[in-house]
């Protein structure tokens, strides 16, 4: 009798690990692609949960969530979209917090085009300037604010090419289809230095702070993996990764 009970306990214990593991579906702002990929690997190792991410424009994610998309956590590129979803009853009360404050950069794949200043932008010697769609992507809106502050919006209007999100804007520049582009600092900067090309890191005074909020959506209310991810994002390991990509906390 003792032996059979012991065997049953061992079998139950062996099955406990997988039973506790869960999967979380996360909608992630495009600017946070590289940091989230780095975070996901550490999170899965530390928690045993699996993170499944979709990357895109925050405005589009809002529409998808309202139409029933199966996301359980939103890592937005702004604070207003999670707040709006919260006011509409689409989130878990008390789960929203700021996980990063984003930076903006004017970037070129050509190492000689930018000298750490907006001189090339003022000179106007380029055919195309890439930005993210300012109606859907906060980084695109920030780019427009910079152009307005510099008094250059009208001068470059005919040269603007809009990407659906900040990833597309970066692709326009990296492939040479645009000589310059406003991109998320995290796309071209890591561990204290520029990863490629040349850039002007735009001073914060030229655009509204890009406060990026995370929130658990209604579908993730009872998912332990969603709660674990939010806790991990608040921790020191995630903070170190986030800051290494040029974000502020």
Image (cartoon, grey):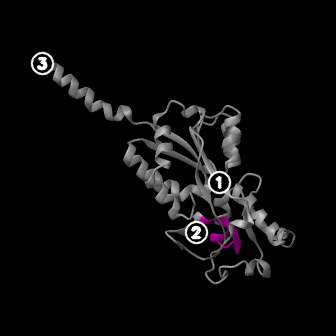
Q: Going by the picture, which residue comes out furthest to the top?
A: 1
* Residue 190, image x, y percentages: 52, 68
Q: Quadrant of the C terminus?
A: bottom right
The residues bearing labels 2 and 1 have C-alpha atoms spaced at a distance of 19 Å
Q: Residues within 10 Å of mark 1 (few under 14, many from 20)?
A: many
Mark 2 or mark 1: which comes first in sequence?
A: 2
Position of residue 113 in the picture relative to residue 147 (left or right): left
Which disc is residue 188 wearing? Answer: 2
Say which of marks 2 and 1 sits in front. Answer: 1
**Which residue: 73% across, 51% down?**
136
Residue matched to label 1: 211
Mark 3 secondary-structure assignment: helix
Using the image, determine if residue 54 lies above or below residue 217.
Answer: below
Residue matched to label 3: 2
Say which of marks 3 and 1 sits in front. Answer: 1
The residues bearing labels 3 and 1 have C-alpha atoms spaced at a distance of 59 Å
* Residue 138, image x, y percentages: 71, 55
Q: Quadrant of the N terminus?
A: top left
Position of residue 136 in the picture relative to residue 185 (left or right): right
**Which residue: 71% across, 33% down?**
88
């Amino acid at each position: 009798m003792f032996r059979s009970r012991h065997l049953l306990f061992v079998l139950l214990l062996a099955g406990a690990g997988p039973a506790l593991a869960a999967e979380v579906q996360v909608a992630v702002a495009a600017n946070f692609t590289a940091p989230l990929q780095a975070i996901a690997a550490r999170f899965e190792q530390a928690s045993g949960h699996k993170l499944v991410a979709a990357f895109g424009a925050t405005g589009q994610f809002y529409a998808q969530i309202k139409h029933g998309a199966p996301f359980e956590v939103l890592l937005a590129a702004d604070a207003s979209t999670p707040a709006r979803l919260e006011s509409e009853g689409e989130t878990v009360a008390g789960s929203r917090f700021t996980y990063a404050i984003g930076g903006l950069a004017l970037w070129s794949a050509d190492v000689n085009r930018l000298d750490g200043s907006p001189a090339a932008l003022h000179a106007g010697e380029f055919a195309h300037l890439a930005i993210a769609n300012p109606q859907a992507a906060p980084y695109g809106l920030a780019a427009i604010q910079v152009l307005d502050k510099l008094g250059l919006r009208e001068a470059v209007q005919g040269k603007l090419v809009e990407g659906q999100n900040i990833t597309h804007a970066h692709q326009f520049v990296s492939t040479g289809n645009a000589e310059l582009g406003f991109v998320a600092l995290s796309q071209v900067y890591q561990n204290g230095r520029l990863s490629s090309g040349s850039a002007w890191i735009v001073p914060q005074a030229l655009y509204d702070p890009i406060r990026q909020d995370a929130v658990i959506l209604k579908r993730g209310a009872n998912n332990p993996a969603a709660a674990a991810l939010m806790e991990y994002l608040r921790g020191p390991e995630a903070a170190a990764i986030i800051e290494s990509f040029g974000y502020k906390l």
